[in-house]
Image (cartoon, helix red, strand yellow):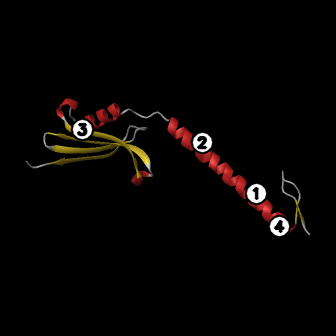
């Protein structure tokens, strides 16, 4: 039998021992990456998000309209699969026959999508 020594590990004998050491080391690596992933998710959940009212105001400012002048205002915080499953505010409203659709990142406050569709009456 061959004697194999791993730094910081017990002495392992034979092929079965080498395989077991590899599995233990691989498991430790997976455990470490799981801890990093959990820490990243915790940090993301602690990141300050803007409120619905703030998101609406950003959308209204972009459209150049006042809240009291819009109809059918709809606001939803949702996960967008097309953007890596990150959260976005989806805001829809109508002003003087024009329909607006705006998507805003709740952390960066950036407008990710803006569309206005003028309807013929």
Relative height, residue 118 to residue 26 (above, below): above
Label 2 belongs to which residue?
39
Q: Which residue is mark 1?
A: 24
**Left or right of residue 110, residue 21 in this image:** right
Of the numbered discs 4 and 1, the one sitting upstream in the chain is: 4
Query: Which residue sits at x=76%, y=57%?
Result: 24
Q: Residues within 10 Å of mark 3 (few under 14, many from 20)?
A: few
Q: Nearer the viewer, residue 59 or 76?
A: 76
Apparent side of residue 91 relative to residue 79 in the rendered image (left or right) = left
User: How many C-alpha atoms fall within 10 Å of the one at disc 2: few (<14), some, or many (≥20)?
Assistant: few
Observer-side mark, 4 or 2, equals: 4
Place of residue 26 in the rendered image (x, y in percent of width and height, measured from the top left)? 71, 58
Where residue 50 sits, quadrant-wise, is top left
Question: Dot 4 surroundings within 10 Å: few (below 14), some, or many (20 or more)?
Answer: few
Residue for badge 4 = 16
Task: Identify the mark nearer the N-term, 3 or 4.
Answer: 4
Q: Position of residue 27 (x, y in %)?
A: 71, 56
Going from N to C along the chain, the mark reached first, 4 or 2, is: 4
């Amino acid at each position: 039998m061959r004697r194999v020594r791993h730094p910081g590990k017990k002495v392992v004998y034979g092929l079965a021992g080498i395989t077991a050491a590899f599995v233990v080391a691989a498991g430790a690596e997976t455990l470490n990456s799981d801890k990093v992933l959990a820490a990243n998710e915790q940090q993301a959940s602690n990141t300050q998000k803007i409120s619905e009212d703030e998101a609406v105001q950003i959308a209204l400012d972009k459209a150049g309209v006042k809240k009291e002048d819009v109809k059918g205002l709809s606001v939803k915080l949702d996960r967008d699969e097309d953007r890596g499953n990150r959260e976005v505010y989806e805001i829809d409203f109508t002003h003087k026959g024009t329909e607006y659709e705006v998507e805003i990142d709740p952390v960066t406050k950036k407008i990710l999508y803006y569309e206005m569709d003028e309807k013929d009456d």
